[in-house]
Amino acid sequence: MAKRRNRPNKSKQQGASSATYGRQPAHATHNIFAGLGAEDTHDGEFNAHLTERFGRASIQSSFVPNDGVPTAAPIRINNDVREYFELAKKPVTAGAWIDKPELPAPSEILPCEKPTFICEEPQPSIDCNESPRPHRAEGAYASNEEYLGTKYELLREDAIRPLREAVAEERKSPYQDEAEYENKGIGIYEPVYLKSIVCSLRGLATRVAFSLSRVKRQIRWEQSKRLITGSLVALSPADDAFQSTCVLAVIAARPIAGLSLDPPEIDLFFARPEDQEVDPMKKWVMVECRSGFFEASRHTMLALQHLMREPFPMSEYLVKVKKEMEPPAYIQHNPYVNLSSLVSMEESGDFENVNVLKEWPASSSQSLDKSQSNALKRMLTSKLPIVQGPPGTGKTHVSVVMMKVLRDNLRREDSPIIITAQTNHAVDQIIRHTMEFEPNFIRLGGRSKDEEIKKRTLFEVRRNTPRQKQPGSQKTQATSAIRKLTSSLQMLLAPLQISEAPLDHRVLLELGLITQVQSNSLVVDPHSTMGVSSADNPGILMALWLGRCLGRCDRPIQPDEHGWGYEEEDFEVEQLQELEAEAVAQDDDIEALQGEEIILCDNHVGKGGSLITVPEIQQLLRRTDDLTTIPALDRGAIYNYFKREVKARILPEVRKLAKQYEEAVLQRKVGLWEEDVRILSEQRIIGCTTTGLSKYRALISALRPRIILVEEAAETMEAPVTAACFPSLEHLILVGDHQQLRPHTQVHAFEDEPYYLNLSLFERLVRNNVAYSTLTRQRRMIPEIRRLLAPIYNDALKDHDSVKDPANRPPVEGMGGNNSFFFCHEWPEDRDANMSSYNENEARMIMGFVDHVVLNGADPSKITLLTFYNGQRKRLIRGLYQHRNASAMRGVKIVTVDGYQGEENDIVILSLVRSNRHHKIGFLSSDNRACVALSRAKRGFYIFGNAELLACESWVWAQVVNIMFSDSKVKVVSGQKRRVGYNLPLQCANHGRKVWIQESDDWDHIHGGCDLSCGGVLPCEHKCPYRCHPFGHDQVNCMMPCARRLNCVHPCAAICSDPCRCPICERRGRGVKAMLKSVPNGTSLRPSSSAAQHLSSETTFQKPANPVPVSKDSETSQVWHSYVNGGAAADDARYVQKAREEQATYAETMRSMTPGSHAGAKSKRLIELSPEKKSVSTSASAILLIDLDMSSGLEVNSHQQSYASAAAPQDSSRTSARMNLLD
């Protein structure tokens, strides 16, 4: 046990960690940050009980306000943000990559042999045919420049190539519809017209309207990946179609209100101010690649360029791959750490001052197992610790425990700890735990689904924080400059705004298109009766001069009225929305793209049949002083010439203002971040995604962070983690699992050898034998599921006692102890319009299985359907919505494997989809994806797929099939030993009988139980007509005729489960139903004698409210009087007889539909009882959980062929042949 030191202010340090935040001299405390010089300081189930494990004082704040500090005085501004941006402008010696622009140049999209650009300014020299350098999977880099340059080039090519390939297809075939292109991810919109310019605080945006004429589909924009905010698009004049001209832009915003218009509208940011356009009549074509997303890489590339201009910590490990790991600098200086949060109150004294570089004290109350404790020690004592957490081993718990220790040892002046991860979900997951003991945190960027975390976004905290004056802040000045530039743009673009008059002659004079003499020639004599004041009516003189040659300009783009069908929804849009959230986070500005909108419009057009050319017009204007002498036939053409020249002469000035606007927007962002630094510096924890970390890098760098935790590090590309290496960084913690999902690349060719772009920093260091810790005890899966991971983790995983206890992991309902099974089939796959694989038969089989499990009592919210393909996910979702028991199955989750890492559920059903003669298994060949798919279930795991194909094409899947077939690794404790086959084994909960399902149609012959008749009695006292079912009779709606007699003495005419009704009384009341007393089902109502007497003694009735007038039909009047004065009894008799006949017919129909009573029903064998293999004759019926309607049942013989095939015993030779292939 390490020797304890006496620490100053010991009484203050016990209890809540907030007591340690007093401003003490560095030499007066043993805090782990105390020794830092003054010049370095600056302004699942397993995780469900973290609060208990942390022990005392786990929810107190670490923030102690200093009441002696006046709040009214202005505070000193932090200049680090503006210095960051100033540093980015400084030149540096490096390769060509260091000077590449933030957004790609046209030469990177078009082939290099014909670079023609709209603007005349010099273009950066970029070789678009240059091949990027490959990523080194093993060994060191020669220099920082080689390391950073390699990351940059690969990342840039991965972000740009998808759009380049889409543009290449458009250049090759410029008039095809989308569906005709080989690239199914291409998006083409033509025509596109400029609608307006939006002067927002985020930038100068251009709103465009576009047609879907080449899409040939209507779009549900809420569920579409098209034109996601942050996506890169390319535009070209429609008459050029990218043959020589290309303009790049980024989607600025996609408001659904605008996209819902016809034609739809969207906002763009042009890549450069020099690309700004103003002509509303110019026709464009716009191309995107829907499979790419530029915003995910944009800010990371800027960060890599910036790293060449500042110190690069951790370069000895990232670049030189140093294997000997040193402690962080602050631990080297003072290794004594307060670890009291790890143990109970009784043992806390021994852990308040521990030298973490030596042996830790022993404890009996630690919440960590041995592997977790070793991992925690590495995390606290290594400069770059790596912790591998296989599924269910509690890596999140270890991270949270470490965060508590670090938080307990922070001082108030220390910079906050940064938590980052690839996804918003992962960031929120760990913040939900840390907020239990540290409420002073901020969620930076992105969108969160957690209501409590939403309250702690930077935007919300900023809004609720009183503003303080900051002398020298750029925000106010920049905002004022933006307003002035907006006014200048409005004045400059006034000739192109909506107006009832044509161009004013004074605009032409100001722009130099006509002389003063020519302008005076248009002015009418003021003493004339035709005199008009041009001051009060701008453009009126030009209208008088044009006369009949002036016409209204038609709308450039018309609504798409073609009756197209809707494009198939993309249910995976949540993943792109997560990235989109980083592109336009609420932190940026509540104004988003709100601002002054300058609508652009060509109001009028010159008409006439003149064939005069532009040179002839120019020559005519040079020699003509009096414009009224120009022939009227040519005036329309001359007016159109004036319009074109006005746009051409305004455009350069607009682009100059756009450049100034861009600089003002950047200046305002710097000023805003300078204010945010004060807010963030008061927090203890900051959470953001890796994309957000790069986007807000200047802001976070100003905080001078020393500690960064990267969750999901093995699923994150190396470049975003490299971007986290701020100059102040001392401690970079990587937590993940390189056996699970790898990073995703947009260009498939960059995966694996030779480029290895999908190789994370986590995995690269592990490959290079850098020491790391592995968690080994899992608390998620029952042993028979965990054994499937043996081929991946080499039997390293051990089971915690909790997963072996049936009380914690009860068997799956309706499966007879078979808590895992691999159902084999050979049903062929197919592909949808997006070339995503799906298997319709497999989807139907899974829907029937889910229905069976739910009918047996499983909670739908505890069931997850997993698949590797989005096409199959769509089929499963559609099948769930259309299922007859859909209401009972509401809550079942249907997700792809890639979107489910880090998640878990009680029952997981995996759809493998792939089944073909070409032996192609696609995504299933990835061992990392297989690891995720096999490790999500806690107590029930069922696989549906072509086992023979997978066993032949994948070593991991072959091992999985072998384990389930031979019952190896871990012996099953219930159910059958062989867990793979072509017949899915079920078990009836009522009778203990086994049922085997082979085809999806076989589900129609059972109701969650077996084939025996139920024989029970319903609450209405009728016999249950259905087969064995696990649900109660109170959930069955009886369809037999009702046997009750009502208060009115008449028999009920309704079926048993419906409200009682009397057609006789309804007829007497002219459609008004009698008010009947509510009685229990099956009870016969006998009216009292007094009630009967009252009914029978009524001999006189009132006339209806609107009787037929006697004067119009005397015969009808006589019939009425006859009826009410004695004919009622005869009429009642006829009605009773008719009701009896209807009831008899109805009863006969129901008897003919009752299961087992059909005379022509052929026997079908579905049930086999081992070992006797006794068969039982059955008949088909329908399944409904809530409303068991007999009339909706299937025909008896509708599935006889597949049913008989399923029921018949398998031929032994056939079975052995199949099993040999699987063995």
Image (cartoon, rainbow, N blue to C red):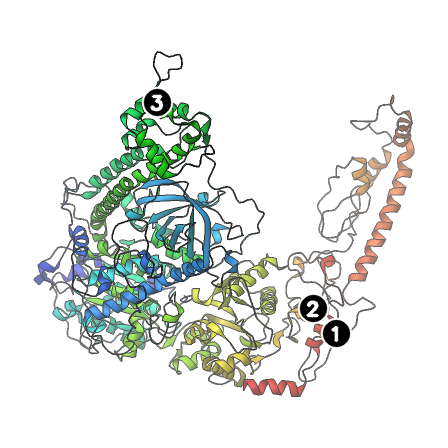
Going by the image, does 886 lie left or right of 343?
Answer: right
- Counting residues from the N terminus, which is met first, the one under dot 1 or under dot 3? 3
396 vs 191, nearest the viewer:
191
Q: Amino acid at mark 3?
A: Leu
Q: Is residue 212 in view?
A: yes
Verify CB contact (< 8 Å) between mark 1 and mark 2.
yes
Residue receiving disc 1: 1164
How many numbered markers are drawn? 3
Q: Residue at x 15, y 67 (%)?
A: 330
Q: Which mark is residue 1005?
A: 2
Q: Earlier in the sequence, mark 1 or mark 2?
A: 2
Query: Looking at the picture, how far across and down is residue 741, in whole percent?
Result: 39, 70
Q: Nearer the viewer, residue 455 or 420?
A: 420
> What is the spatial separation of the Cα atoms under label 1 and label 2, in whole angstroms?
10 Å
Nearest the viewer among 534 and 867 is 534
- Residue located at (38% from left, 71% from top): 749
What is the distance, in whole Å, between disc 2 and disc 3 at their CAs?
91 Å
Q: Which residue is mark 3?
A: 522
Which quadrant, please, contains the C terminus? bottom right
Q: Earlier in the sequence, mark 2 or mark 3?
A: 3
Is residue 437 depicted above or below 146 in this figure? above
Nearer the observer, disc 1 or disc 3? Answer: 3
- Quick check: can you spot residue 689? no
Question: Is disc 3 placed on a helix, strand or loop?
Answer: loop
Q: Residues within 10 Å of mark 2 (few under 14, many from 20)?
A: many
Give the distance between the C-alpha atoms of the residues marked 1 and 3, in whole angstroms: 98 Å
Residue 536: give its label. Answer: none
Question: Pointer 1 and pointer 3: residues touching (CB < 8 Å)?
Answer: no
Give 771 or 1055, whichever is nearer the viewer. 771
